[in-house]
Image (tube, coloured by chain):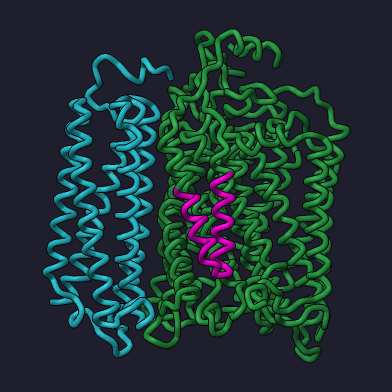
Chain colours: A cyan, B green
Amino acid sequence: MSDQTLNPETMPEQPERATLEGKNKFLGFWFFLGGETVLFASLFGTYLALRNSTNDGPGAEELFGLELVFVMTMLLLTSSLTSVYAMYHMKNNSFGKMQLWLGITVLLGLGFLGCELYEFYHYIHGEGFTLRSSAFGSAFYTLVGFHGGHVTFGLLWIIALMVRNAKRGLNLYNAPKFYIASLYWHFIDVVWVFIFTVVYLMGVI
Amino acid sequence: MDFFDRFAIPHPSPVIYASMVAIALTLVAIVAGVTYTKKWGYLWREWLTTVDHKRIGMMYLISALLMLFRGGADAIMMRAQTALPENTLLDSQHYNEIFTTHGVVMIIFMAMAFIMALMNFVVPLQIGARDVAFPRLNALSFWLYFWGAMLFNISFVIGGSPDAGWTSYFPLAGNEFSQSVGTNYYMIAIQIAGLGTLITGINFIVTILKMRAPGMKLMKMPMFTWSALITNLIIVFAFPVLTVALAMGTIDRLFGGNFFTTTDGGMDMLWANLFWVWGHPEVYILILPAFGIYSEIIPTFARRNLYGYKSMVASIVLISVLSFVVWVHHFFTMGQGAMVNSIFSITTMAIAIPTGIKIFNWLFTLWKGKITITVPMLYSLGFIPIFTIGGVTGVMLGMSAADYQYHNTMFLVAHFHLVIIPGVVFAMLAGLTYWWPKMFGFMLNERIGKLSFWLISIGTCVAFFPMFISGLDGQARRMYTYSEATGFGIWNMISFVGAIMLAAGFVTIVYNIYYSTRYASRDISSDPWDARSLEWATHTPVPDYNFAITPQVNSSEAFWDSKKNGHKLFPGNYKEIHMPNNSGVPFIMSAIFFVLGFALVFSIWILAVIALLGIFACLAHRSFEQDHGYHIPVEEVKETEEKLGGARQ
């Protein structure tokens, strides 16, 4: 495809789905998210099966406090909103604003990740609660850690896209890339809502 | 020296040392051969970096055939060891290793690869597409599978093979009872190959949903494409469960996790459940494409259109749904209550209904057809009775109360081999023979092919029917030897004879490939079977771009209509064709996955971190490069078409 067709004079309304490649990516990514849903469902199932197998170590009620988790939830929910703003500006073809909002999304994501690392550090060194202490520990660190890994990957992905396209601007070749990265980010957010509910709320209450 | 101790084989035997020498010599021979013929550049440009679905399909095919012989060698060794009571050919440890690798190699690295081979080659052609939706991801899928298979296969010469069965049940597969690195190989090599399979799943769903020729509504798709679509949907929703199970098994084994341990609160049944939540749909991932292949071959050689197209589609969909709700029947005896067992008994037996519908549809297609007995047709006709025997014994196993008698005996082994061999292996051999002329431009010899069929089908019956009897008499599976007083000897000896026949059958297939490559006529039409679907509408060999003009489809058998009813398949003129560029990144990235896997198996953490960084670098490379593909100009299309024996317009 020539540069001309990818850089039209006026951008179409949905630049992420204007090319066949874009459409394919869009659909394929939804199926990928379907697979990811099954992946997390299996991890949640495992967690629910093992959460009371504490091996006489600390359980959910003793460990979890809702304050930090609330801050983390707010950070991640807000980052989802800012990524929506970024996509809004993508559709309006204002590249600078999109980059700005993506930057804010990345900062919020980093804040979330920092809190999570602090939380893990606190459990390991403050409470002596590790992956090896019990089946509950293994299930907790694996579920929450898998999510944390997804956040890290999402951040690296968005940063790579921002850096790579900084000088190129928006076109029909990279618009689908930005769009599916933001879809991924929303998915991570949804998973966190379930972690917040199933792991923390149900653990404390 | 401590560091190197871990690479030693725990139970060395002369056979293993001989294999090491053989592997080293083969590698040297390959490198020397390619260097001598100056083919490195050709290999890299045309194969290692290709993103063409046809070439990727051929590479899957070669790998699958190699794995068939690897798994087959294991099978022969097993049957040889048990042919006589108290035989001492193999010790118990060696026997455990070969029944484990036999299962894994045959299912994950042979059957899956064979299916991927035919799907890759045929599906884009059947739907009139230029390629798959994501050609480069397709290459990545293949190379992940390839390097995963390589990682699994080096296990028996470096560090020891897995020995806890292909189901790898915990706590047996845990560190306490499986101390060698073998089970690490199992967890990580399957993970890498599984990643490739998941990517294929997504790729083919999008290809089939988005890339079909104009006019090809969903209900006008050829049956093989339908089965591929549903299979890939099952892949996308079943493989992540395996991913999680393997990841947790890895965490238990390498990082001291407690998911499946018997101490510290772990739950060993969790593995069994997760494994079979993936494992049972996996059975249908294997069988549905096979059903699709039979649904292509039977109408072609019965000269009738497929009977009951809609009920065929409905039954595939129904099977795919039911496949997710039967997993407990793999462990009826392992501690659920009667209520749970009853529910899963019913869902299990329910699968026989849509399967029965398909069997009857094939029979009705044959009814009053003008049947020609070719090799692909022979396999299809042989499949129906043998598969039905395997299927009906499956219903017997599905009755949970009766299963207490059959569970873990040779009866079960007989059952699943009698569904998988006629179901999958016959279908793959039929498909291979059927599509071979499209792939390579000549036909496989029919006479040798028929000999192979008779050897393989009679061999299957001789090898597995006796197991029903010895199983009912109480011979447990995976037993490396037994005393003469049990009376199992005669049945096992008959099985061994059958296994030899099977092996002879596969050797004749290789001979057939050799013989036909040398002597078969290259002067064949692009439609040698007088077939019905679109893959036969283009030239042989298929040009890079598949179809010069996108075909226009009006029915489920558009090509047949164009031959018999004057339907115009290729309207319009040649246009410029947009093609994807080749790329070496999938190959390199997958090779780094191999290094990562090797480092994890042996807990070499520094290497693992370096490899992980390498993988991220490959991913970033994809984000940073600008790749818009290239165009084939109209003149070149015209020239190619004329060179291939007349333009298709």
Q: Is residue B601 magenta?
A: yes
Q: Position of residue B633 (x, y in %)?
A: 55, 12
* B517 in relation to A189, above or below: above
- Determine which quarter of the picture holds residue B607: bottom right
* B178 in relation to A112, above or below: below
Left or right: A42, with B231 as reference point: left
What residue is shown at x 67% (from left), y 58% (from top)? B421
Q: Position of residue A79 (x, y in %)?
A: 18, 49
Per the picture, the main secondary structure of the magenta-coloured stretch is: helix
Identify which residue, B129 or B387, lies in the foreground.
Answer: B129
- Determine which quarter of the picture holds residue B341: bottom left
**Range of the magenta residues?**
B588-616
Identify which residue, B470 or A99, lies in the foreground.
Answer: A99
Question: Where's the N terminus of chain B, which quadrant?
Answer: bottom right
Q: Position of residue B431 (x, y in %)?
A: 66, 42
Query: Does residue B26 appear in the picture of this structure?
Result: yes
Left or right: B23, with A60 as reference point: right
Question: Where's the C terminus of chain B, which quadrant?
Answer: top right
- Determine which quarter of the picture holds residue A98: top left
Q: Position of residue B603 (x, y in %)?
A: 54, 70
Left or right: B518, with B289 as reference point: right
